[in-house]
Amino acid sequence: MIVKVHDWVDDKACKQRYKQIADFERMMVENGTTIIKCFLYTSKEKQKERMVERLNEPHKTWKFNPSDLEECALWPQCMKAYEGALEATSTKDAP
């Protein structure tokens, strides 16, 4: 997701990776593996709450990185990237 959001790879590379994931999952299913996909979602509000805790609680300040604030601004792009990845890798074999 982060490589997509920061444009560290182009669309062609992302599509190739998604295809490789789908191919790998299809192979696993053909060999008897049941694939269960889980998406762990944390809301923007919960992320903000965690960020504030990192700043306000002395035992959590070590977790804070100023670049986290810049990453928070990319929330819409992150959600779009997640949706794209989930859509691209949801197949008949491994929905």
Image (tube, grey):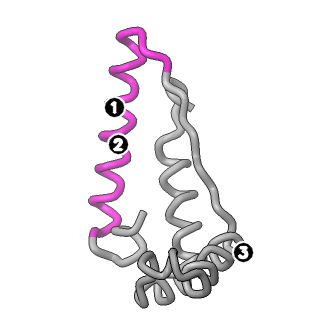
Query: What percent of the width, then of the height, locates residue 46?
Result: 69, 70
Position of residue 37 in the picture relative to residue 9 (left or right): right
Q: Residue furthest top?
A: 32
Residues packed near mark 1 inside 10 Å, few (<14), some (14 to 19) or many (20 plus) = some
- The Cα–Cα distance between marks 1 and 3, rounded to whole angstroms, is 36 Å
Side of 47 where 15 appears, left or right: left
Circle 1 is placed at which residue position? 23
- The residue pinned by badge 2 equals 19
Q: Nearer the viewer, mark 3 or mark 2?
A: 3
In the rendered image, the vertical position of residue 13 relative to residue 91, given as above or below? below
Q: Which residue is mark 3?
A: 45
Pointer 3 or 2: first along the chain? 2
Q: Check contact, mark 1 vs mark 2: CB within 8 A.
A: yes
Distance from Cα at disc 1 to Cα at disc 2: 6 Å
Q: Which residues are magenta?
A: 9-34
Mark nearest the camera among 1 and 3 is 3
Query: Is 41 a magenta residue?
Result: no
Q: At numbered mark 2, what does the secondary structure look like: helix, strand or loop?
A: helix
Q: Quadrant of the C terminus?
A: top right
The reply, left or right, for residue 51 in relation to residue 1 is: right
